[in-house]
C-alpha cells in the first residue's frame, strides 16, 4: 500500500512539530481543552451575526405581511386575498416552470464545462474558466441589454426569433447566462477532487469510459449536482432583474413583488410574495439534510488525487463544447460593451465615449465607483472569513448539534430571500428607533453586512462542498494527537481548501460590485453605489450609459480577479502541490 | 534644511485641518430626498447654495417608486429633512400617513392654486408639471407604413397592433397617470373600453416610465406612450422621433417640495422650501419643463404647442389616489391574466 505516501506534504509535515510542541509545553496542571468551548462560542457568534443581518430584517418584513397597519394580527386574510387574485395561480405556475427549465438547462451545461476543466486535458483551462465565470462580473442588467440588442425587434439576429424575445425565452436565456457561473462554481468544486484509485480499479476491470462516468464520476458528484439544481432554481425564481427587462407579458412572482413594493408601496403584499419565495429554499434544506446522511467523503486521507491523462477524443469533444458555451457568453458581453460605445443605436453607429462621461448622469459619478470598490473589499474579506469558518464549524466540529442544525438552516435562507425583501427588511429593522444597532443604518458596515448575508448561500455551499470532501479523519487524528482544533483548521483545512477559499473571496467581491436589489434601500448620500447607478440609468432609459457603467464594473472585477489570481497562484502552488499528484 | 521642510509640512497639516474645521463649523447639512434627474440637481443645488452658503445638501436620489418606498419604510424614524422634487401623488400618499409638515413658504400667493396641496398651510408646493405625450419613431413608421397618430383614439387602430409600448401602471407612476387620465376624461365605462381596445395593440408594458420613449427612439417599438420631458429630451439628443400631444387632453402630475415631519434642521429646511417656491427657482425649472407652478414664468418650447398648458386635463389628485388600489386591481385583472395569448 502506498497510503502514507499520498498524504499531502504540507499536511503531514507540520503535524509532528505540532504534537512535539504540545508535549513540551505540557504543564503539571492539564491544559484546558479549548477545542470544546471555542467552537461553541464561535457558533454563537455566527448565530448573532445571522440574527442581526438576516433574522431581524426578515421578522420585520414578515410583520408587514401578517399585521394590519395598526399592529393587529391580520390572520389569513392577506393570504386569501393573494390567492384569490385570478392572476396569482397562473403566475405561480409560470414562475415554477421557467425556473425549472432554467435549472434543467443550466446545470448540464455547467457540468460539461466543469468536467472539461477538471477531468480532461484540454488546453487553455485558465482562459475557459475565466470566461465561464465572467457572467458573475456583470450587473444583472447586462444580459437584458445584450439580449435586446441581439434578438430584440431591432436586434442583430431578430430574424432568428420566431416570435418576440420578450417573454419566456427572454427570461430563460437571461437567467441561464446569469445563473451559469453559480452552478459552475459548485460543480467545479464537486469535480475538483476524486480518488484516483477508483478510476485505476475501474480501468483495470475493463469498464468502458461511459460506464466509469456513470458509476464513478456522477455518483461522486451528485451532491454538487443537486446543490447546483436547487441554487439555479431558487436564484431564478427570486430574481426580478432579468424578467423586469426581457419578461414582457410573462409575469412572474419576483416581478410582482417588485411591482408591489416599488410601484405601489404595498410592503405587505411584497413581503407575502417574498414569504412564498422562501418555500423552495426550505424544501432544499430538507432534501439537503436527507442527502447529507447518505453522503460520504470521497477523499479519505488514503486517497490519491485523480489526474486525467490526455485522450484526444475525449479532450476534443470537451474542447468543442467548452468553446461553444464560452463563445455564447462572450457574445453577450461583447454586444453589451458595443452598446456602450455606439452613439445612438441603431440609427447612428458612430463610435463614441460620451456614455462614459458619468458626471451628468445618475448615481454620484466616481464617488459611487469608489464606494462600490470599498463595499466589494469589505464584503469579500469579512464574508470569506465568516462563511468559511461557519461552514467549518458546522461540518467539522462536534457538540451543539441543535445549534449547527439551526445555523445550517439559516445558511440556506439567504438564497431564497429576494434582495428587495432583504433590503427593505434591513431598512425597517435597522432604522427602528428602538433598535440599539440603528446607528449602523446608512453606513458602509451595514451595506457590507447586508451583502454578506445576501450572498451567503452560494459561498456557503462552495465551502461545504469542499469541506465534505475532506476526510473527518483529519480532525479525528488531530484530536487524538491533542492538537487544538483551531490549529488543525489553520494548518490543514485552510491550505487544503485554498482554491475554494479564493473562489469564495472572488465570488463575494464581484457579486458585491454588481449587487443592486438588497442595497438599493440602504445606501445614503455618502454611500451611493455604482451598481445602483446602473439600474437608475437603465430605468431612465439611458441604455448607453448603463452599458458603459456595466462595462466599467465588469472590467474592474475582471482586473481584481486577475490580480487575485496572480497573487494567489504562488501561494496556491505551494499549498496545493499535493493535488497535482503523480501521473499514473 | 531638514527642519524647515518638516516645519512647513507641519504648518500645512495644521492649516488644512483648520480649513476643514472651519468648513464643518459653518454648514448645516440637509438630507434631501429626490426623484429629479441628475443633471437638473446640479443646477438647482448650485443656485440654492449661492443664496444659502451655510446650508449643505446631501442628496438621496432614486426613481420615484424607490424614493417613495424608502420614505414610507423610514416612517418610524425619518431620515430625510426635505423632499425636493417628487410626484405630488407620492407626496399625497406620505401626507395621508401624516409624514409631512405643512408649511407656507414665502411667496406662496404667487403659486397657482392648481399646483399646491389644497390644505392651508399646504403640505406640499409644486415646482413643475409633466404630462403625457407620445413618442413616434418616424424612421420605423416609414419602414413599416404606420400613419402618424394624433389622438388617443388613433392608437386603437388595428394598424398599430403590437407596435405600442406603455408603462405598466402597477409599476410606474407615469403609467398610472395615463390610466387615471383616461378614466377621468372618458368616464369609467368608456375609459375601460378604450383600454380594452388599446391593449390589443400593446407590444409590451414596461416597468419604468422613461423606457417607452427610449424604446420608441431606438425603434424597438415604434410608438411609446411617455411624458413630454423625456420625449423632448430624447428628441433633442438626436433620436428620430416626433413628440405628439394627443388631441383629447393630457394626463399630468406635478413635481413638488415638502418638509418631512420630525426634521432636526427645521430652519434650514424652511429656507429650502422657500427657495423651491421662489421665482428664481422657477426660472431654473423652466429650463426643463414647459409649465411651472408660478404662472407666466415659463417660456414656450419650440417642440411644444403654445396652448400646451390648456391641454392638461382637470386632474383630481384625491380621486386618483383614493381609487388607485381599485383601478390597479381591475387593470391587472383585465390585462395581465390573459397576457399569455398575445405575441
Image (cartoon, coloured by chain):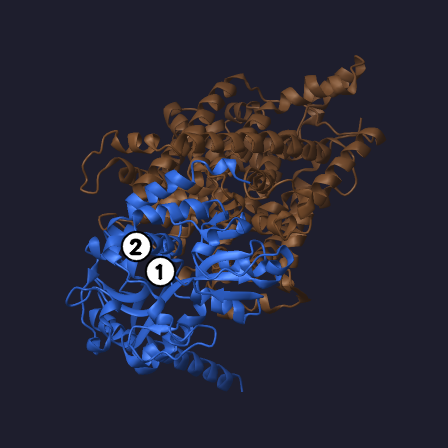
Chain colours: A brown, B blue
- Against A91, residue A517 (above or below) is below
- Against A441, residue A17 (above or below) is above
Q: Dot 1 corresponds to which residue?
A: B251
Q: Are marks 1 and 2 in contact (CB under 8 Å)?
A: yes
| A572 vs A289, nearest the viewer | A289
Q: Could you tell me which quadrant the C terminus of chain B lies in?
A: top right
Please, what secondary structure does the residue beneath circle 2 have? helix
Left/right placement of residue B5 relative to residue A270 reads right
Residue A254 visible (yes or no): yes
- Against B124, residue B195 (above or below) is above
Instruction: Return the chain for callout 1.
Output: B
| B321 vs A280, nearest the viewer | B321
Residue B116, quarter of the rendered image: bottom left
Q: Dot 2 corresponds to which residue?
A: B184
Q: Position of residue A258 (x, y in %)?
A: 40, 45
The mark that comes first in sequence, 1 or 2, is: 2
Q: Position of residue B302 (x, y in %)?
A: 47, 77
Instruction: Return the chain for callout 2.
Output: B
Question: In the displayed image of the protein, which residue is found farthest to the top?
Answer: A205
Q: Position of residue A48 (x, y in %)?
A: 34, 39
| A279 vs A211, nearest the viewer | A279
- The CA distance from mark 1 to mark 2 is 9 Å
Amino acid at each position: 500500500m502506498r497510503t502514507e505516501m499520498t498524504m499531502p506534504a504540507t499536511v503531514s509535515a507540520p503535524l509532528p512539530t505540532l504534537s512535539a510542541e504540545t508535549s513540551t509545553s505540557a504543564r503539571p496542571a492539564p491544559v484546558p481543552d479549548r477545542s470544546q468551548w471555542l467552537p461553541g462560542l464561535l457558533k454563537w457568534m455566527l448565530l448573532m451575526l445571522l440574527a442581526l443581518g438576516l433574522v431581524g430584517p426578515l421578522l420585520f418584513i414578515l410583520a408587514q405581511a401578517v399585521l394590519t397597519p395598526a399592529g393587529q394580527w391580520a390572520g389569513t386574510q392577506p393570504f386569501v386575498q393573494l390567492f384569490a387574485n385570478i392572476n396569482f395561480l397562473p403566475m405561480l405556475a409560470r414562475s415554477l416552470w421557467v425556473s425549472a427549465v432554467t435549472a434543467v438547462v443550466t446545470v448540464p451545461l455547467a457540468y460539461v464545462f466543469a468536467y472539461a476543466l477538471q477531468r480532461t486535458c484540454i488546453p487553455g483551462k485558465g482562459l475557459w474558466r475565466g470566461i465561464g465565470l465572467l457572467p458573475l462580473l456583470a450587473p444583472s442588467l447586462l444580459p437584458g441589454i445584450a439580449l435586446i440588442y441581439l434578438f430584440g425587434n431591432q436586434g442583430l439576429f431578430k430574424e432568428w426569433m420566431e416570435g418576440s424575445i420578450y417573454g419566456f425565452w427572454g427570461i430563460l436565456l437571461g437567467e441561464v447566462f446569469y445563473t451559469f457561473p453559480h452552478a459552475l462554481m459548485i460543480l467545479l468544486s464537486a469535480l475538483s477532487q476524486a480518488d484516483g484509485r477508483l478510476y485505476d480499479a475501474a480501468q483495470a476491470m475493463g469498464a468502458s469510459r461511459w460506464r466509469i462516468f456513470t458509476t464513478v464520476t456522477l455518483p461522486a458528484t451528485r451532491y454538487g449536482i443537486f446543490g447546483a439544481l436547487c441554487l439555479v432554481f431558487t436564484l431564478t425564481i427570486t430574481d426580478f432583474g432579468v424578467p423586469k427587462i426581457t419578461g414582457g407579458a410573462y409575469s412572474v412572482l419576483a416581478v410582482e413583488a417588485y411591482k408591489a413594493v416599488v410601484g405601489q408601496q404595498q410592503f405587505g403584499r411584497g413581503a407575502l410574495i417574498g414569504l412564498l419565495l422562501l418555500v423552495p429554499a426550505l424544501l432544499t434544506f430538507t432534501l439537503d439534510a436527507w442527502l447529507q446522511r447518505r453522503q460520504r467523503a470521497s477523499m479519505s486521507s488514503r486517497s490519491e488525487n485523480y489526474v486525467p491523462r490526455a485522450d484526444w477524443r475525449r479532450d476534443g469533444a470537451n474542447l468543442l463544447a467548452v468553446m461553444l458555451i464560452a463563445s455564447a457568453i462572450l457574445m453577450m458581453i461583447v454586444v453589451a460593451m458595443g452598446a456602450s460605445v455606439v452613439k445612438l443605436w441603431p440609427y447612428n453607429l458612430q463610435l463614441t465615449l460620451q456614455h462614459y462621461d458619468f458626471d451628468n448622469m445618475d448615481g454620484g459619478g466616481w464617488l459611487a465607483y469608489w464606494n462600490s470598490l470599498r463595499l466589494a473589499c469589505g464584503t469579500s474579506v469579512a464574508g470569506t472569513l465568516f462563511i468559511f469558518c461557519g461552514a467549518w464549524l458546522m461540518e467539522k466540529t462536534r457538540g451543539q448539534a441543535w445549534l449547527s442544525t439551526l445555523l445550517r438552516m439559516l445558511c440556506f435562507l439567504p438564497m431564497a430571500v429576494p434582495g428587495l425583501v432583504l433590503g427593505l427588511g434591513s431598512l425597517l429593522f435597522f432604522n427602528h428607533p428602538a433598535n440599539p444597532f440603528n446607528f449602523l443604518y446608512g453606513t458602509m458596515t451595514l451595506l457590507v453586512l447586508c451583502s454578506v448575508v445576501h450572498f451567503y448561500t452560494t459561498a456557503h455551499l462552495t465551502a461545504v462542498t469542499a469541506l465534505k470532501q475532506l476526510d473527518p479523519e483529519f480532525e479525528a487524528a488531530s484530536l487524538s494527537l491533542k492538537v487544538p482544533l483551531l490549529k488543525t483548521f489553520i494548518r490543514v483545512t485552510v491550505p487544503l481548501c485554498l482554491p475554494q477559499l479564493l473562489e469564495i473571496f472572488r465570488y463575494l467581491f464581484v457579486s458585491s460590485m454588481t449587487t443592486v436589489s438588497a442595497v438599493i434601500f440602504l445606501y445614503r448620500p455618502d454611500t451611493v453605489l455604482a451598481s445602483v447607478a446602473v439600474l437608475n440609468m437603465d430605468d431612465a432609459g439611458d441604455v448607453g450609459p448603463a452599458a458603459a457603467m456595466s462595462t466599467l464594473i465588469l472590467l474592474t472585477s475582471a482586473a481584481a480577479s486577475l490580480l487575485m489570481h496572480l497573487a494567489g497562484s504562488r501561494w496556491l502552488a505551494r499549498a496545493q502541490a499535493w493535488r497535482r499528484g503523480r501521473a499514473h | 534644511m531638514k527642519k524647515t521642510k518638516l516645519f512647513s509640512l507641519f504648518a500645512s497639516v495644521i492649516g488644512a485641518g483648520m480649513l476643514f474645521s472651519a468648513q464643518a463649523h459653518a454648514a448645516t447639512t440637509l438630507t434631501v430626498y429626490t426623484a429629479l434627474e441628475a443633471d437638473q440637481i446640479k443646477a438647482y443645488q448650485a443656485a440654492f447654495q449661492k443664496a444659502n452658503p451655510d446650508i449643505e445638501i446631501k442628496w438621496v436620489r432614486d426613481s420615484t417608486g424607490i424614493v417613495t418606498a424608502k420614505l414610507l419604510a423610514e416612517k418610524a424614524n425619518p431620515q430625510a429633512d426635505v423632499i425636493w422634487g417628487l410626484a405630488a401623488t407620492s407626496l399625497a400618499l406620505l401626507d395621508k400617513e401624516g409624514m409631512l409638515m405643512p408649511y407656507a413658504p414665502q411667496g406662496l400667493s404667487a403659486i397657482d392654486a392648481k399646483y399646491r396641496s389644497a390644505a392651508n398651510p399646504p403640505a406640499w408646493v409644486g415646482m413643475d408639471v409633466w404630462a403625457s405625450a407620445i413618442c413616434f419613431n418616424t424612421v420605423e413608421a416609414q419602414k413599416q407604413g404606420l400613419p402618424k397618430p394624433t389622438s388617443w383614439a388613433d392608437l386603437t387602430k388595428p394598424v398599430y397592433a403590437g407596435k405600442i409600448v406603455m408603462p405598466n401602471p402597477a409599476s410606474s407612476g407615469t403609467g398610472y397617470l395615463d390610466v387615471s387620465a383616461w378614466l377621468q376624461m372618458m368616464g369609467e365605462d368608456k375609459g375601460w373600453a378604450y383600454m380594452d381596445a388599446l391593449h390589443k395593440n400593446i407590444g409590451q408594458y414596461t416597468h419604468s416610465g422613461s423606457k417607452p420613449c427610449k424604446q420608441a427612439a431606438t425603434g424597438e417599438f415604434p410608438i411609446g406612450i411617455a411624458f413630454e420631458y423625456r420625449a423632448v429630451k430624447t428628441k433633442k439628443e438626436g433620436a428620430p422621433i416626433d413628440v405628439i400631444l394627443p388631441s383629447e387632453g393630457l394626463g399630468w402630475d406635478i413635481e413638488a417640495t415638502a418638509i418631512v415631519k420630525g426634521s432636526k434642521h427645521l430652519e434650514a429646511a424652511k429656507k429650502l422650501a422657500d427657495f423651491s417656491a421662489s421665482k428664481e427657482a422657477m426660472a431654473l425649472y423652466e429650463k426643463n419643463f414647459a409649465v411651472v407652478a408660478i404662472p407666466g414664468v415659463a417660456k414656450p418650447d419650440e417642440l411644444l404647442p403654445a396652448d400646451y398648458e390648456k391641454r392638461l386635463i382637470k386632474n383630481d389628485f384625491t380621486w386618483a389616489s383614493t381609487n388607485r388600489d381599485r383601478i390597479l386591481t381591475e387593470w391587472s385583472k383585465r390585462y395581465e391574466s390573459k397576457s399569455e395569448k398575445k405575441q
